Amino acid sequence: MTPLEHPMARAHSATRRRFVLGACASAVALAFASAGFGFPSLFTQAFADTPPAGLDGFLLLSRKLTGRTNFDPVLAQRVYDALSKSDSEFVANVSALNVWLAAHGGVPSDTVTEALKADTPKLAVTVTAVMRAWYLGLVGDAPRISVVAYERALMFDPVNDVLTIPSYCRDVPFYWTQKPPGAA
């Protein structure tokens, strides 16, 4: 039996052949990709760090804007559904905002809206809507405002150690901003 006829030699030879063929196929694919023969989009999609879409994308955006790491899943779904229903472009805007925030290296959330107003005003409106929904628990504009959270609105978190949150709303939203009857 010659060394090339040994079963282990054939196994090594087959393994080397597969490796060389795989390496060649990869080199050809990369050559086509760099030459622009339609493969770039395939490689971009396969290896790009694309943000998640839907509820996951909304939660990613919410974490970036609020600085919080966790949200109540039921409340998150309710907020997401209400915002999606109130704005037909909401889902696309959330994806665009995640891409914008990733490209701008983590712009602090308090300056995002101002930066977007000059760049992309419709995305600035979406940021405001998301923050308003989480912190005030409100979605939409008058006269069609939806209350999606009250006791669990994030505005109560900074004072939860000293303020008892009423378990009911005493009047219409923002009733406290109006002057009382008879006040000058």
Image (cartoon, grey):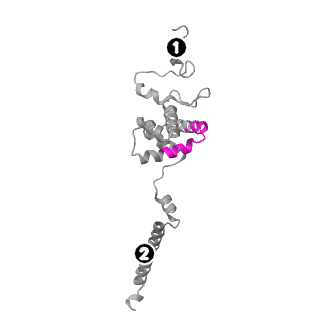
What residue is disc 1 on? 179
Q: Residue at x 55, y 10 (%)?
A: 181
How far apart are labels 1 and 2 at the CA level?
A: 79 Å
x, y (%) of residue 158?
41, 27
Q: Residue at x 41, y 78 (%)?
A: 16
Q: Residue at x 52, y 43 (%)?
A: 94
Residue 12 falls inside the magenta stretch? no
Q: Residue furthest left?
A: 3
Who is closer to the viewer here, 119 or 38? 119
Q: Is residue 36 visible?
A: yes
The region drawn magenta spans 80-97
Whether residue 179 is situated above or below residue 158 in the rendered picture:
above
Q: Which mark is residue 19?
A: 2
Give the residue type at disc 2.
Phe
Who is closer to the viewer here, 157 or 10? 157
Q: Is residue 67 visible?
A: no
